[in-house]
């Protein structure tokens, strides 16, 4: 029998993938389209020649002025090796830190130790579990948790990220965000054609 990755149910055998984690993260924390702009795989650069431009796994912008236009950056980690490599190269996340008020690592439940998270970052644990597994996982939550009993999907903040006052976005970031949104619209399949009822005499 195949082993199941931490925080994943047998229905999702194999290593958790970034697409799954991002989908759960968006549903749990940024479902309101009128409040949040949620951008996946945001490339910080708009020139065609700049193929090596840094990418942010996900970036969320709160659109409500009374929320201070909060900006949150997410770095997805699906393996311990990837996370440990990140710790050795902290400059890799400096762009994400520069543009966000809060910076979070996002990983499957119990993959990382809470004490491993750098002081300037937070940790969100995301995945799919049975209800029994969830009862054990929820003990790690630190203020926010969400569990969908139908799908088994969960999302919880286990290490809150400290708030950092950072300068507003540059025009380069704004252009990258607009380009990201346009690509998302372009990639969506077209709506089905309207069907008309045929009248027979």
Image: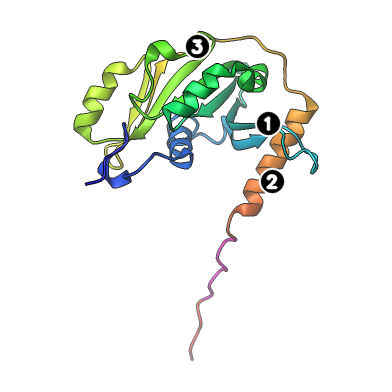
Q: Nearer the viewer, mark 1 or mark 2?
A: 1
* Residue that numbered label 1 is attached to: 54
The earlier-in-sequence mark between 3 and 2 is 3
Q: Are marks 1 and 2 in contact (CB under 8 Å)?
A: no
Figure disc tally: 3
- The quarter holding residue 176 reads top right
Magenta stretch secondary structure, dominant:
loop
Residue at image point 42% right, 26% down: 80
The answer to whether one can see residue 118 in this image is yes
Of 61 and 35, which appears nearest the observer? 61
Asked if the magenta segment contains residue 1, the reply would be no
The answer to whether one can see residue 69 in this image is no
Horizontal and vertical percent position of residue 67: 58, 17
Return the mark for residue 195: none
Pointer 2: residues within 10 angstroms few (<14), some, or many (20+)? few
Structural distance between the alpha carbons of marks 1 and 2: 19 Å
The earlier-in-sequence mark between 1 and 3 is 1
Q: Nearer the viewer, mark 3 or mark 2?
A: 3
Return the mark for residue 182: 2
Pointer 1: residues within 10 angstroms few (<14), some, or many (20+)? some
* Residue that numbered label 3 is attached to: 118
Look at the picture and state if 20 lies above or below 196: above
Look at the picture and state if 118 lies above or below 82: above
Pointer 3: residues within 10 angstroms few (<14), some, or many (20+)? some
Q: In terms of secondary structure, where does tag 1 sit?
A: loop
Look at the picture and state if 22 lies above or below 81: below
- Left or right: 131 in relation to 6: left
């Amino acid at each position: 029998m195949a082993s199941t990755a931490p925080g994943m149910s047998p229905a999702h055998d194999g290593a958790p993938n970034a697409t799954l984690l991002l989908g759960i993260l968006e549903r749990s924390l940024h479902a309101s389209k009128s409040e949040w702009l949620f951008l996946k795989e945001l490339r910080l650069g708009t020139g065609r020649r700049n193929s090596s431009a840094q990418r942010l796994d996900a970036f969320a912008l709160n659109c409500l002025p009374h929320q201070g236009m909060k900006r949150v950056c997410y770095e997805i980690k699906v393996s311990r090796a990837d996370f440990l490599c990140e710790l050795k190269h902290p400059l890799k996340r400096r762009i994400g830190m520069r543009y966000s008020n809060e910076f979070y690592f996002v990983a499957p439940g119990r993959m990382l130790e809470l004490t491993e998270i750098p002081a300037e970052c937070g940790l969100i644990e995301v995945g799919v579990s049975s209800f029994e597994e969830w009862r054990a996982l929820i003990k790690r939550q630190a203020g926010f948790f969400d569990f969908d009993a139908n799908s088994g999907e969960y999302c919880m903040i286990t290490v809150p990220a400290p708030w950092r006052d950072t300068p507003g976005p540059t025009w380069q970031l704004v252009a990258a965000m607009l380009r990201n949104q346009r690509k998302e619209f372009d990639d969506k399949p077209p709506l089905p054609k309207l069907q008309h009822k045929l009248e027979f005499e």
